[in-house]
Image (spheres, rainbow, N blue to C red):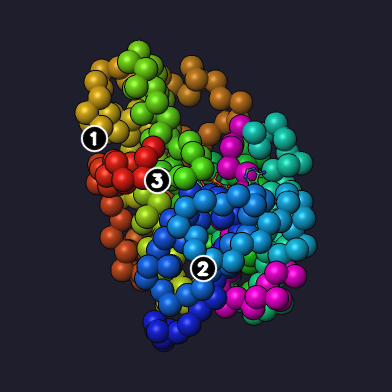
């Protein structure tokens, strides 16, 4: 049964400075009849946050989520917080577990206390990358610590007894007021320097525009869908190909970009090579039409003209 779209909602978003959270706030404020509660480790949020209630919760103080939820009684709670630096997770395993698992456990306990619909983000890095792109029902087998923590967070969602939606995504790019550097911004920075540089051509995924993620979230809330949904861009490509597309959209000299292997790059933490996600379920059940990377990066270019880099 489709949910009532005119319902007055209160939506609590944890990890308010994440780029995904910023896009969701823009979307729900424009498209849903909702008041927004933001939870962040920072007390200096900027941007269009008039009428938004802000709570500051320092890292590791996650028990406060429940106090906030009981005070505000949100009907929907969205967790965007995570330690997303894959190499940092390999080095600081304790910090990664705290941010990616303990935080989620507390988020879901808070959701359970107020009977909220809880949305949580996960990743294609829960897979080993031997035969991607992956469907919702493929068997996870993480090869790095970030992937292990995100799989653990999914398992907590399943056992929580909460109405929970897991949104798996990958290679997210988009506007960040807080200058969270994604792959697109990194490539633009390198092209700006005007010197040749190398990008791996053996790591595959679907670059996903953050505004598409926000639209999927709106639909999941309206339709009250629970379970796992892959939320990923239209094209399946490697990082080298994506970088070439970025250069094309921003009219840079794409011959500055050269290919290399993951072995040559030598990242601290191993990456799944043929990763990525099949988004058929979201396309059919949520009626999503995901943009390809040329379209998404072109929209981002327009946004950068309005909002700055
Ligand atoms: N970016 C990607 O390519 C990608 C790919 C697949 C899945 N995802 C998932 O999508 C979700 C949102 O990702 P995002 O890229 O929007 O995140 P992001 O821009 O990196 O922001 C993450 C936010 O999480 C909070 N946080 C909590 N513990 C942290 C810690 N130890 N270190 C840093 N930040 C911490 C912070 O929020 P406050 O500053 O407000 O406290 C931070 O702004 C995450 O669950 C991520 O795993 C992202």
Specify which label sits upstream in the sequence, 3 or 1.
3
Residue 114 visible (yes or no): yes
Helix, strand or loop status at disc 2:
loop
Q: Which span is picked out in magenta?
A: 66-87
Percent coordinates x, y for residue 152 in the rendering: 67, 54
Percent coordinates x, y for residue 135 in the rendering: 43, 56
Please indicate whether residue 48 sits to the left or right of residue 112 in the image.
left
Assess whether residue 215 is covered by the magenta stretch: no
Please indicate whether residue 263 sits to the left or right of residue 253 in the image.
right
Task: Identify the residue position indicated by label 1 in the image.
Answer: 249
Task: Residue 209: give its label.
Answer: none
Q: Nearer the viewer, residue 118 or 25?
A: 25
Task: Identify the residue position indicated by label 3 in the image.
Answer: 174
Helix, strand or loop status at disc 3:
loop
Which residue shows up at 56% across the image and 25% down it?
A: 267
Q: Nearer the viewer, residue 107 or 45?
A: 45
Residue 140 visible (yes or no): no
- In whole angstroms, how far apart are the C-alphas of marks 3 and 1? 14 Å
Q: CB atoms at circles 3 and 1 under 8 Å apart?
A: no
Which residue shows up at 43% across the image and 67% down it?
A: 28
Vertical side of 144 occupied by 187: above or below? above
Vertical side of 155 occupied by 94: above or below? above
Label 2 neighbour load within 10 Å: few <14, some 14-19, many 20+: few
Hey, which quadrant is residue 293 in on the image? Answer: top left
Helix, strand or loop status at disc 1:
helix
Task: Identify the residue position indicated by label 2 in the image.
Answer: 51
Please indicate whether residue 245 sits to the left or right of residue 94 in the image.
left
Label 1 neighbour load within 10 Å: few <14, some 14-19, many 20+: some
């Amino acid at each position: 049964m489709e949910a009532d779209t005119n319902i007055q909602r209160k939506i609590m978003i944890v990890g308010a400075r994440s780029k995904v959270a910023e896009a969701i706030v823009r979307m729900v404020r424009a498209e849903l009849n909702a008041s927004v509660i933001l939870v962040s480790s920072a007390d200096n949020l900027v941007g269009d946050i008039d009428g938004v209630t802000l709570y500051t919760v320092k890292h590791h103080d996650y028990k406060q989520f429940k106090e906030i939820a009981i005070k505000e009684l949100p009907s929907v709670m969205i967790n965007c917080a995570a330690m997303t630096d894959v190499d940092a997770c390999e080095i600081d395993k304790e910090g990664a577990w705290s941010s990616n698992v303990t935080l989620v456990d507390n988020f879901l306990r808070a959701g359970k206390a107020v009977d909220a619909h809880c949305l949580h983000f996960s990743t294609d890095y829960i897979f080993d990358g031997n035969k991607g792109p992956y469907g919702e029902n493929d068997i996870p087998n993480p090869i790095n610590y970030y992937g292990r923590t995100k799989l653990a967070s999914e398992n907590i969602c399943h056992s929580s007894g909460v109405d929970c939606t897991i949104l798996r995504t990958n290679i997210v790019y988009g506007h960040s007021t807080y200058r969270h550097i994604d792959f697109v911004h990194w490539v633009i920075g390198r092209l700006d320097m005007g010197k040749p540089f190398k990008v791996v051509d053996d790591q595959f995924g679907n670059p996903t525009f953050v505004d598409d993620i926000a639209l999927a979230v709106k639909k999941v809330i309206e339709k009250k869908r629970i379970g796992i949904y892959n939320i990923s861009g239209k094209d399946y490509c490697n990082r080298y190909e994506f970088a070439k597309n970025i250069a094309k959209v921003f009219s840079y000299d794409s011959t500055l970009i050269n290919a290399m292997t993951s072995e040559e790059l030598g990242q601290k933490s191993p990456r799944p090579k043929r990763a990525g996600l099949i988004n058929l379920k979201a396309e059919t059940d949520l009626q999503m039409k995901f943009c390809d990377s040329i379209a998404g990066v072109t929209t981002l270019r327009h946004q950068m003209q309005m909002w700055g880099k």
